[in-house]
Image: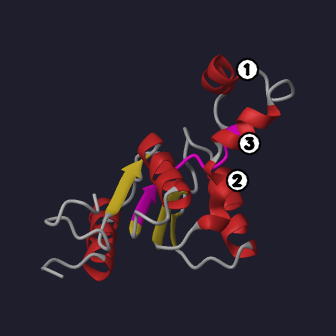
């Protein structure tokens, strides 16, 4: 992208929800030189905590394939964060366990990496329960982008 003069490589951002949130973390941690801002909603940071029907189908048993579980978890690379990161998660997530985000927070704190976190108490994976929740969430995402990747030229 640096060879495309119409792309401002200092202002590349990424965001995603669920699997897309996990991808956001991987891109922010593994390609910190490229991605300036990321927003990860309901991400799976540690695949050891995800549903075994999915993880074991692709990774095998954790006891027999610990190295791949480690390599496949963005949590392993949290100390490489250099850009702006917003992590959002519902504490009552029924799909991607909130404990994964807690592990991520602990890893980022241990590595002294600044980030922003928003927890929505008792919200499930959709983060849609409760009056005003959706408006609040999308307002949060919008303002984070406006602050960290403002519109305009270089």
Which residue occupies 47% across, 54% down?
A: 27
Q: Quadrant of residue 55?
A: top right
- Is 40 in the magenta? yes
Question: Which residue matches tag 2?
Answer: 76
Q: Is mark 3 on a helix, strand or loop?
A: helix
> For this view, does 85 lie left or right of residue 66?
left
Give the residue number, with chain letter if any, for mark 3.
Answer: 70
> x and y percent of residue 152 in the render?
12, 79
Instruction: Give the image location of residue 81, x and y in percent.
Output: 57, 68
Q: Distance between the residues labelled 2 and 3?
A: 6 Å
* Residues drawn in magenta: 38-48
- Indicate which disc, 2 or 1, sits on the residue closer to the N terminus: 1
Contact (Cβ within 8 Å) of mark 2 with mark 3 = yes
Quarter of the rendering occupied by the C terminus? bottom left
**SS category of the residue bearing label 2:** helix
Tell me what residue is drawn at x 28 percent, y 77 percent: 143
Sort mark 2 into few (<14), some (14-19) or many (20+) by Cα contacts within 10 Å. some
> Looking at the picture, how far across and down is residue 15, in whole percent?
36, 56
Closer-to-camera residue (118/10): 10
- 115 shown above or below 64: below
| Distance of label 2 from label 1 (alpha carbons) | 19 Å
> Is residue 102 among the parts visible in the rendering?
yes
Q: Is residue 132 left or right of residue 117?
A: left
Q: If you read the primary sequence from the N terminus, does the residue marked by circle 2 or circle 3 appear first?
A: 3
């Amino acid at each position: 992208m640096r060879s495309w003069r119409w792309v401002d490589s200092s202002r590349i951002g990424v965001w995603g929800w669920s699997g897309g949130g996990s991808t956001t973390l991987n891109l922010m941690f593994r390609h910190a030189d490229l991605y300036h801002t990321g927003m990860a909603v309901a991400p799976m940071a540690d695949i050891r905590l995800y549903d075994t029907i999915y993880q074991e189908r692709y990774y095998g048993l954790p006891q027999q394939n610990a190295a791949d579980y480690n390599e496949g978890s963005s949590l392993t690379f949290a100390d490489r964060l250099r850009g702006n990161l917003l992590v959002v998660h519902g504490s009552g997530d029924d799909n991607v366990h909130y404990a994964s985000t807690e592990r991520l927070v602990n890893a980022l704190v241990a590595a002294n990496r600044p980030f922003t976190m928003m927890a929505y108490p008792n919200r499930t994976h959709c983060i849609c329960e409760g009056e005003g929740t959706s408006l609040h969430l999308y307002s949060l995402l919008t303002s984070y982008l406006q602050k960290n990747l403002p519109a305009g030229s270089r």
